[in-house]
C-alpha cells in the first residue's frame, strides 16, 4: 500500500491558520442534514501507488481542486498531484526529499501558487522533480483557492460539508494503523478504531466528501485507486469511511482544512 509520510503529529497554529468557526456559524448536529454526499462532483480516481511516493497531501489537495472546479465552475479540471507536492516541498526547502507535507503547506501552495493541470505534469515517478515552466504557472494561476480554513474539530468538518450555501470538501490528515489496510477494511470500506496495542504506520492525507450522522461516519476519497470492495457514496470503489470517534483524539486525528474558490 501507499507510503505514510505526512508528519504524524498535530499541526501547531500559525498566522496562516484561520479557523472555520471564526468565519462561519457552527450549527449543532441536530440542525444539520442527516446525510451529506459531495461525491457527484469528484474528479477521476487517483492512485499514488503508481508513482509510489508519499504524495498523499498532493493527491488529496489536487483532488479538492478537481472537486471545486466541477462544483462551482462546471470545469472538468484534473490537477497535477505531483506538481502540488513539488510546490509543497519547495516551501520548506525539501525539494529532493520524499518526506510528505503538512496540510498547511498544501493550503499555502494552493492559495499562493495554485494547482496546474495534470496534463502538464502527470504522475510519473521519474518526474519527482521537474523544472517548473511558465505554462505550469499560468495553469496554476487559474486554479487557486481563495481561502483555506482550519477545521480542528469534528463539528467544524461536519458544518463545512453541510453548509447551506457554500458546502465544500475538507482535506483531512489522519494517523493510520495496520487495521486501516486490513482485508476486512478493504472489503467493507469501513475503517475501525485502532486496537489498544496497534502501532501507527504514519500519517495520511485524504479528502472528506460526505457524512452520515445517524451511523456516525465520515466518508473519504482515498488515493489508492479503486481498492475497496464496497461502493460508498458512488461507484468508484475508491472511498472509505471513518467513525466519528476517530476525530476525538490526536492518536488518530491530525488536522483538517476546508477550501474555497
Image: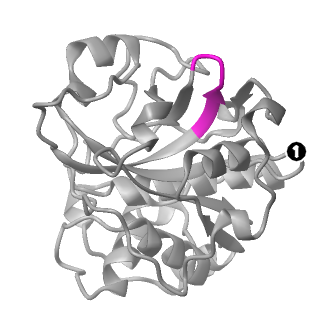
- Image coloring type: one colour
Which residue is most to the right?
165
Relative to 159, 193 lies left or right: left
Write down the residue under mark 1: 164
Q: Residue at x 43, y 43 (%)?
A: 248
Q: Give 105 or 20, whichever is nearer the viewer.
A: 20
Residue for point 55% across, 77% down:
17
Left or right: where 172 falls relative to 203? right
Q: Up-down: is 133 above or below 40?
A: below
Which element type, helix, strand or loop, lies under badge 1? loop
Q: Nearer the viewer, residue 101 or 79?
A: 101
Percent x, y of residue 182: 21, 20
Q: Is residue 145 visible?
A: no
Q: Position of residue 1 (x, y in %)?
A: 19, 35
Q: Magenta segment, which residues?
A: 209-215
Residue 171 pos. (x, y %): 52, 53
Amino acid at each position: 500500500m501507499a507510503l505514510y509520510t505526512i508528519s504524524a503529529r498535530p499541526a501547531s497554529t500559525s498566522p496562516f491558520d484561520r479557523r472555520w468557526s471564526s468565519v462561519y456559524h457552527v450549527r449543532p448536529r441536530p440542525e444539520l442534514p442527516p446525510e451529506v454526499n459531495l461525491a457527484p462532483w469528484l474528479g477521476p480516481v487517483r492512485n499514488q501507488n503508481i508513482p509510489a511516493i508519499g504524495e498523499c497531501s498532493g493527491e488529496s489537495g489536487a483532488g479538492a481542486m478537481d472537486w471545486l472546479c466541477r462544483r462551482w465552475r462546471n470545469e472538468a479540471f484534473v490537477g497535477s498531484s505531483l506538481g502540488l507536492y513539488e510546490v509543497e516541498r519547495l516551501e520548506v526547502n525539501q525539494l529532493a526529499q520524499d518526506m510528505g507535507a503538512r496540510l498547511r503547506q498544501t493550503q499555502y501552495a494552493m492559495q499562493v501558487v495554485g494547482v496546474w493541470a495534470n496534463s502538464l505534469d502527470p504522475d510519473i515517478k521519474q518526474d519527482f522533480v521537474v523544472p517548473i515552466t511558465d505554462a505550469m504557472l499560468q495553469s496554476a494561476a487559474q486554479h487557486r483557492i481563495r481561502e483555506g480554513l482550519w477545521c480542528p474539530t469534528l463539528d467544524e468538518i461536519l458544518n463545512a460539508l453541510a453548509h447551506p450555501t457554500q458546502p465544500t470538501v475538507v482535506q483531512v490528515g489522519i494517523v493510520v494503523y495496520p487495521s486501516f489496510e486490513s482485508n476486512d477494511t478493504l472489503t467493507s470500506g469501513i475503517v475501525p478504531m485502532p486496537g489498544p496495542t496497534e502501532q501507527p504506520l504514519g500519517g495520511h492525507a485524504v479528502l472528506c466528501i460526505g457524512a452520515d450522522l445517524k451511523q456516525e461516519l465520515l466518508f473519504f476519497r482515498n488515493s489508492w485507486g479503486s481498492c475497496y470492495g464496497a461502493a460508498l457514496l458512488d461507484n468508484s470503489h475508491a472511498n472509505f469511511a471513518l467513525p466519528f470517534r476517530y476525530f476525538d483524539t490526536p492518536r488518530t486525528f491530525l488536522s483538517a482544512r476546508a477550501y474555497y474558490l
